[in-house]
Amino acid sequence: MSLTAKTCVPCQGGIPPLTRVESEHFLKEVPEWMLSDDGDKIERQFPFDDFAKAMAFVNKVGDLAEAEGHHPDISFGWGYANVIFFTHKIKGLHENDFIMAAKVDLL
């Protein structure tokens, strides 16, 4: 099943984060995302023509995050939006992060 067909499952903690190998496997489905040096986050920067388009994108990501119950760290400004996913409760990556990355890619 593709990541975009899945929904996020609430993470209650108490489980280990994905290993680097597991994360690299999921990255094949979201190849424009970068794995952090520590392997605990994924990040992508999206370019835009102006501030208004970046802000509109950020609002769509926010709506998606609320619907899925899984929230990224987002920064944006004129011509860009930067999105970072990781699962706070496990201090690392979970399948949910990759599900969200795939769904953000569709926006």
Image (tube, helix red, strand yellow):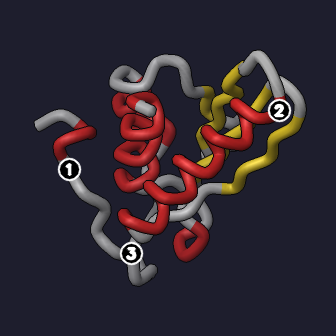
Vertical arrangement, residue 33 with respect to residue 97, above or below: above
Query: Residue beneath label 1, please?
Result: 6
96 to the left or right of 66: left
Sequence-first tag of 1 and 3? 1
Q: Above or below — where is 12 with respect to 64? A: below
Q: How crowded is mark 1: few (under 14 residues within 10 Å), some or many (20 or more)?
A: some
Please state, as top left, top right, bottom left or bottom right, where the C terminus lies in the image: top left
The kind of residue on which mark 3 rests is Cys
Which amino acid does the dot numbered 1 rest on?
Answer: Lys
Q: Mark 2 points at which residue?
A: 51
Q: Which of 15 and 77 is in front in this view?
A: 77
Q: Name the residue under label 3.
A: 11
Total label count? 3
In the picture, which quadrant includes the N terminus?
Answer: top left
Could you tell me which residue is drawn at 34 percent across and 24 percent down?
29
Front-lying residue, 68 or 98: 68
**Front tag of 1 and 3:** 1
Residue 44 in view here: yes
Q: How far apart are marks 1 and 3 (CA)?
A: 15 Å
Whether pointer 3 and pointer 2 mark residues with C-beta atoms closer than 8 Å, the reply is: no
Quick one: label 3, few (<14), some, or many (20+) residues within 10 Å? some
